[in-house]
Amino acid sequence: MNAPDPATAPRRAGLLRSTAVFSAMTLLSRIAGFVRDMVQATQFGTGGAMSAFIVAYRIPNFLRRVFAEGSMSMAFVPVLNEIRERGDKAALKEFVDHMAGALCAVVLVICALGVLLAPLVAGLFTPGWALAEPEKFGWTTQMLRITFPYLLFISMMALAASILNSFGRFALPAFTPVLHNLTLIAAMFWLAPKFHPQPFGLAWGVLIAGALQLLLLWPALGRLGLRPRLRWGFRHPDVRKVGKLMLPTLFSSSVAQVNLLVGTAFASLLVDGSQDWLYYSDRLVEFPLGLFGVALGTVILPHLSRRHAAEDGAGYNQSLDWGLRMALLAGVPAGLGLLLLADPITATVYNYGKFTVHDTHMAAISLTAMSIGIPAFMLSKVLSPAFFARQDTKTPMRAAILTVIANVLLTLALTTPLWINSTPGAHGGIALATALAGIFNAWLLWRYLRRAGLHQPQPGWGRFGLRLLLACVVMSAVVLALRYWIGAWSDIHGVLPRVLWLLLVIGSGAAAYGVVLLALGLRMRDLRH
């Protein structure tokens, strides 16, 4: 057996350090994302062609998370690490070459079908527009033909990111969303004015952003000696193994995105702007999820898969237990903070130019409802990899199927009465259904883990829960007191004053949360794995 190559030896950084690196780079992305959303809301407002762009952007993004960042990554990384454990560099390179060729071939076919069948795809996700708003439906179809090829670039980029993450190189993959956001900001200023309606320029910006992200990561694989040479790979045994693992994960790894698309379809039946309000509130929810949840899931998957491959059951259980605590430590205050500050945050980020006070209030409604599910969304980012690391993809698939069924039923139950009675804010029912379905999904995954004996809680959970509860109570009191003292956010004029006041409230709440945890005995060493 060949000895492992030193250049490709895994880095032995701790999980906390790796998560911190990923989160720091993701923070840059989210800041760029806030700027992008602010410019987008200000310049284009809501409704009309902007709603069409949001749907045309959301569909390939959903497929990206299914085929690239979701199922492909979850199935690919454990197999990659399994081959690495053998120490055969030549076999590892051959596997990467064949995997890249197979993925490229599959996604090319999907992109071609998406472009050809764009009217059918658009009709599936916007039935209300297909029946009652033909112009908006036509815009959606045309933009979808522009954005669909983005899936090819971003899927190959995700393959490169998975390889780099497996070797402990988290910073560069985490930076790629920054490039994406900067490209879209540039498209708003330089491309959009050249089109009519202007959001068509954003659709072209999405395609350009995907190509630039791939160009950023692909050369980095050369430094590991793993830059892929595309080869027909469907007969390669390890590629076929990834394919078998992927099939169940196509659904389970992106249950939140499936639920969002269910909401997208329902929102097309509601008043104009509902798609936009849900999109903008979802973007705010994605901030803590991207900063902490995705970082945890990305870092913990290769670690758990290595522990499983090395038959280290104790290490696997300790890593999983650490991940669950970290998810709650970040997720509970994040969800509570968005719940308490939905109106101020929405007003600070979006309420300028063509994004009206009414739009702000409507987006805040859906943000309030969605924020309830943030702790569960974060837990799922840890719970799902716990199965995928063991190459068990069927169990998360069962949970995902039940979750989507629950989401459809909840959406019907919560939204239909509001829609029939023409109640303002009916889209909030869609957001609440998404949050409750997320809670149900996390509970199912945890229950399956416990029943299978894959998670044995480590000592200290009772003390941890009490600290978390008391810290959140104090944080809430500080946030509410400052909100009452500042008064109505709509009375604050200008971007800078709003940002400064919001930073004061968030910073004070975060400080109170941290101080209480420290006073109750939580130390940095308790967070290290």
Image: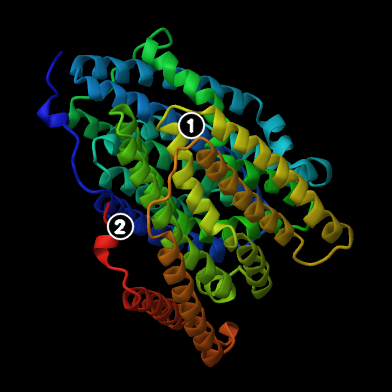
- Judge by depth and name the residue closer to the eye, 111 or 507: 507
**Going from the N terminus, do you reach mark 2 or mark 1 first?**
2
Relative to residue 199, is residue 1 depicted above or below? above
Rendered location of residue 254, percent (x, y) = 55, 39
Q: Which residue is drawn at 35% across and 15% down?
A: 98
Rendered location of residue 285, percent (x, y) = 53, 59
Q: Residues within 10 Å of mark 2 (few under 14, many from 20)?
A: some
Q: Residue 71 carries which label?
A: 1
- Can residue 85 be seen? yes
Quarter placement of the N terminus: top left
* SS at circle 2: helix
Q: Which residue is drawn at 59% across and 43% down?
A: 444
Which residue is farthest bottom?
Answer: 485
Q: Which residue is drawn at 24% across and 40% down?
A: 168
Relative to residue 59, is residue 333 depicted above or below? below
The residue pinned by badge 2 equals 24
Q: Left or right of 185: which side holds 277?
A: right
